[in-house]
């Protein structure tokens, strides 16, 4: 759905504090991917715990998928740019994630799910983001929503920049999802050559931009393809301005930090070691999900 935006001026853009190149790795049953937000950045980018980018036209890189595995203590947001992935979980949810759709899953106290490709060839491309839950809500019941492309609000600026608002509010357009505790803003931006785009968000929120096509310039610094720019939390900065001299596509993600201890062990993210041991015991004894 295309909506009318109320474009807001950014008086001072954030600058790029640090440029990150992802780390090639594999997960699930051997899916090749690039981990962009790694564990050492969890404090800096609180409330975000992980960002993976997958992009391949070689079925050997993705066909094994992600068979049954558990999660506890956070949310996963999967944005499928191209390809088809079937989701099934222990709470009885099933869905097909495809072409521009998003899956938002709250693992909460526990879920066991599988994410398996429903294609034997062609391109599979997308992102999976992990968003933390505050301590007092880590043990809420699991929750799940499939958001097809048509249900993601989008707007187009006068310069032809097309923006899809997955979560939060950008230039007056509220996205498909909102979250009170972490106030995430998650937008997918398609910029034609020669265009500029701005969106406001609080200076206290941790923010980053990932360019997945072309290149962008942010406050005079170039952010190239497949690079993440961590944006500095400059107190006077009221948002960010992106400029594209060549066509570019990027995601911009920011959120309100929780400021709580982060204890991760694989698919479990809690606040203390004791809670991690409990999650492992619950999983081994069949009490994690359900
Ligand atoms: Co998973």
Image (spheres, rainbow, N blue to C red):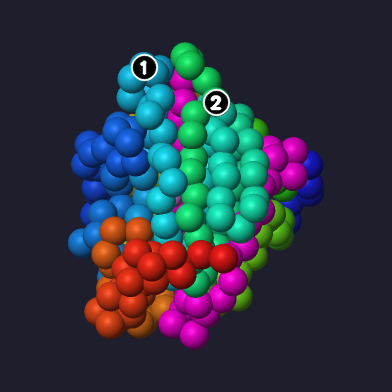
Q: Residue furthest front?
A: 285
Determine if the magenta segment contains residue 144: yes
Residue at label 2?
118
Q: Earlier in the sequence, mark 2 or mark 1?
A: 1
What is the x, y in percent for residue 54?
38, 34
Kindly tell me whether residue 74 is visible in this rendering.
no
Q: Which residues are magenta?
A: 123-151
Camera-nearest label, 2 or 1:
2
Q: In the rendering, at what x and y percent does residue 19 appear?
A: 25, 49
Distance from the alpha carbon under mark 2 to that under mark 1: 14 Å
Check contact, mark 2 vs mark 1: CB within 8 A. Answer: no
Q: Residue 24 lies in what quarter of the image?
A: top left
138 in the magenta segment: yes
In this figure, which residue is indicated by the disc labeled 1? 58
| Residue 191 image-quadrant placement | top right
Q: Is residue 268 left or right of residue 118?
A: left
Q: Nearer the viewer, residue 41 or 227?
A: 41
Q: Residues within 10 Å of mark 1 (few under 14, many from 20)?
A: some
Task: Work out which quarter of the rendered image holds the C terminus and state it.
Answer: bottom right
Q: Is mark 2 within 8 Å of ligand 1?
A: no
């Amino acid at each position: 759905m295309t909506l009318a935006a109320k474009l807001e001026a950014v008086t001072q853009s954030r600058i790029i504090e640090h440029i990150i190149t992802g780390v090639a790795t594999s997960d699930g049953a051997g899916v090749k991917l690039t981990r962009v937000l790694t564990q050492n950045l969890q404090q800096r980018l609180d409330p975000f715990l992980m960002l993976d980018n997958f992009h391949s036209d070689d079925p050997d890189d993705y066909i094994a998928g992600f068979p049954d595995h558990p999660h506890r203590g956070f949310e996963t947001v999967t944005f499928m740019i191209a390809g088809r992935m079937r989701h099934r979980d222990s709470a009885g949810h099933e869905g097909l994630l495809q072409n521009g759709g998003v899956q938002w899953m709250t693992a909460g106290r526990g879920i066991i799910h599988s994410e398996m490709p429903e294609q034997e060839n062609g391109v599979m491309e997308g992102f999976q983001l992990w968003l933390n839950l505050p301590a007092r809500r880590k043990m809420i019941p699991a929750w799940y929503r499939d958001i097809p492309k048509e249900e993601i609000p989008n707007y187009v600026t006068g310069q032809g920049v097309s923006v899809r608002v997955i979560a939060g509010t950008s230039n007056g357009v509220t996205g498909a999802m909102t979250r009170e505790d972490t106030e995430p803003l998650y937008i997918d931006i398609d910029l034609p050559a020669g265009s500029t785009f701005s969106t406001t968000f609080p200076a206290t929120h941790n923010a980053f931009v990932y360019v997945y096509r072309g290149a962008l310039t942010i406050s005079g610094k170039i952010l190239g393809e497949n690079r993440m720019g961590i944006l500095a939390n400059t107190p006077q900065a009221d948002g960010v301005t992106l400029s594209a001299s060549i066509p570019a596509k990027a995601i911009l993600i920011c959120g309100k930090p929780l400021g709580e201890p982060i204890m991760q062990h694989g698919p479990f993210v809690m606040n203390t070691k004791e809670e991690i041991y409990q999650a492992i015991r619950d999983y081994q004894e069949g009490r994690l999900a359900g």
